Amino acid sequence: MADQHELREKGLRLTPQRELVLQAVRDLGHATPEEVAEKVRATHPGINLSTVYRNLETLENVGLVLHTHLGHGGATYHAAEELTHLHLVCSICGDIGDAPIDTAANFVNTLSDDYGFKTDVTHFAIYGTCQKCSK
Amino acid sequence: MADQHELREKGLRLTPQRELVLQAVRDLGHATPEEVAEKVRATHPGINLSTVYRNLETLENVGLVLHTHLGHGGATYHAAEELTHLHLVCSICGDIGDAPIDTAANFVNTLSDDYGFKTDVTHFAIYGTCQKCSK
DNA sequence: TTCCTTCTGCAATCTCTTTGCAGGTATTAA
DNA sequence: TTAATACCTGCAAAGAGATTGCAGAAGGAA
Ligand SMILES: [Mn+2]
Ligand SMILES: [Mn+2]
Ligand SMILES: [Zn+2]
Ligand SMILES: [Zn+2]
């Protein structure tokens, strides 16, 4: 398992629970801690929610997982290698669309040139109204 | 008071507490419910936190106030007429910079043209690393 | 006034997340 | 192999932020 490498470098371990949490995040695309726990419990009912929280934090620390904010509330988690798109979140129907990161390239460059600000466009969703709900 | 108009139309009242909450939001620029309560309590110690929450919600419903997300946690509130800038939030030092909304105009137009998505660029902050922390 | 609705303070409750701890498991060093 | 050490888990408790039920107060209409 290649993931083990990222962890062992920092003295951390790839426990069964940790591996299940990582796999759940990868399978789900994006998911809340609760959703991750639910997914893992489908095969391993014993896992505790606090273990999920702690492992999401650990996996984020080693760079295997990232969190974003898609709604008003808490975070949702992505596999790090998969966070290659913007999230277009509709405030009306809640739908989550995707757009290539390049869509924001000019915007990001402008912020860098004019303000010296290095933008991470994926950390927060792009919020608005989807095509369907605009009509 | 012009604000009274927005409220009375919907059978709502401009109570002293409601007016204080609105004034606090205007004075503070952007503020969490807790910060609003603290500000109001400087002159009116009796106000209850739940009253602040309820009034922020009511003021948002009538369009006098809006909320945005500047950090990982909960919402912060703005006076509606003042939300005319992007928030550039630094993930390292926590600094909150401003940029004109027009900075995002091309980006917003692209999303509209290509995806039919109408973006509200102020609801979530722009997240990244400020100039100072980039060095 | 009288009647009706809205609003407030207070306490209780809820959801989400974090933390302390004791026992368990992996890794390393004798 | 054994002993020492560090990491990890489940469980329960606690914390933080936000919401809700309720009784009384206050605003507005007539
Ligand atoms: Mn929001
Ligand atoms: Mn975040
Ligand atoms: Zn929609
Ligand atoms: Zn900074």
Image: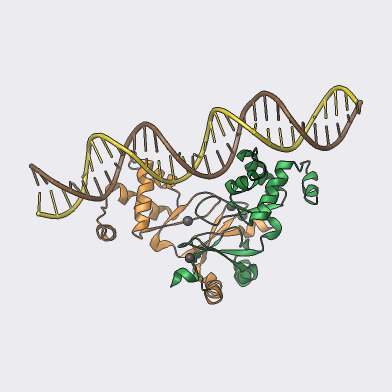
Chain colours: A green, B orange, C brown, D yellow
Describe residue A3's horizontal placement relative to residue A48 as left or right. Answer: right
Q: What residue is rendered at 37% in x and 46% in y? A: B52
Query: Is residue B64 shown to the viewer in this render?
Result: yes
x then y, percent, for residue C30: 91, 26
Query: Is residue A113 shown to the viewer in this render?
Result: no
Task: Determine whether A17 is above or below B66 in the image.
Answer: above
Describe residue B56's horizontal placement relative to residue B3 as left or right. Answer: right
Which residue ends up furthest to the bottom in the rendered image?
A: B113
State which quadrant residue B129 falls in: bottom right
Which residue ends up furthest to the front in the rendered image?
A: A43
x then y, percent, for residue B31: 45, 51
Describe residue A51's horizontal placement relative to residue C10 as left or right. Answer: right
Task: Determine whether C10 is above or below A10 in the image.
Answer: above
Q: What residue is rendered at 66% in x and 52% in y? A: A25
Task: Determine whether B50 is above or below B110 in the image.
Answer: above
x then y, percent, for residue B61: 36, 57
State which quadrant residue A44 falls in: top right
In the foreground, B64 or B100: B64
Q: What residue is rendered at 81% in x and 48% in y? A: A5
In the foreground, B79 or A50: A50
Q: Quadrant of the C terminus of chain A?
A: bottom left
Q: What residue is rendered at 58% in x and 50% in y? A: A32
x then y, percent, for residue A108: 62, 68
State which quadrant residue D9 falls in: top right
